[in-house]
Amino acid sequence: MLEEARENQRAVGAFNVYNLEGALAVRDAAEALGRPAILQFHPGSFDFGGAALLQLCAEVASSAKVPMATQLDHAANEKQ
């Protein structure tokens, strides 16, 4: 995804999400624009959604009609 963006001189948006609704909004916007996106998780998002949020967002990303990925943003340790 990132290599293709670089080759085409485009950016890939990365958005911190804190709940399923946020992840779905990012997916819907990415699909509407036909562009890839990254769902990022700030450590604070795990205070609200825990591992279940990560699993739900992984499912949202894998079912998207455009390339999507998930990424831990600023994790303090491997457990986050």
Image (cartoon, rainbow, N blue to C red):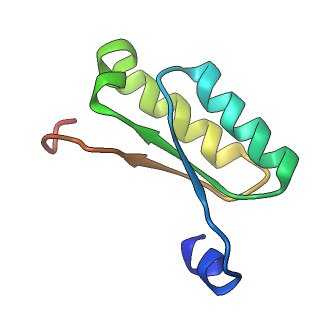
User: Which residue shows up at 33% across the image and 44% down it?
Assistant: 73
Considering depth in this image, is 29 or 20 the residue closer to the camera? Answer: 29
Q: Position of residue 43 (x, y in %)?
A: 28, 30
> In this picture, is 13 found above or below 32?
below
Q: Is residue 57 left or right of residue 4?
A: left
User: Which residue reaches farthest bottom?
Assistant: 7
Q: Quadrant of residue 54?
A: top left
Q: Which quadrant: the C terminus? A: top left
* Horizontal side of residue 41 vs 78, given as left or right: right
Question: Depth check: 8 or 77 in front?
Answer: 8
Question: Total of numbered circles in the picture?
Answer: 0
Identified at 68% across, 29% down, the residue is 24
Looking at the image, which residue sits at the far left?
A: 77
Residue under the point 60% across and 70% down: 1
* Residue 18 in the figure: left or right of residue 31: left
Above or below for 41 versus 38: above
Q: Position of residue 77 (x, y in %)?
A: 13, 42
Q: Residue furthest right?
A: 32
Residue 25: x percent and y percent? 70, 30
- Residue depicted at x 83% and y 56%: 34
Residue 53 position by quadrant:
top left
Residue 7, position as x, y percentages in the image:
65, 86
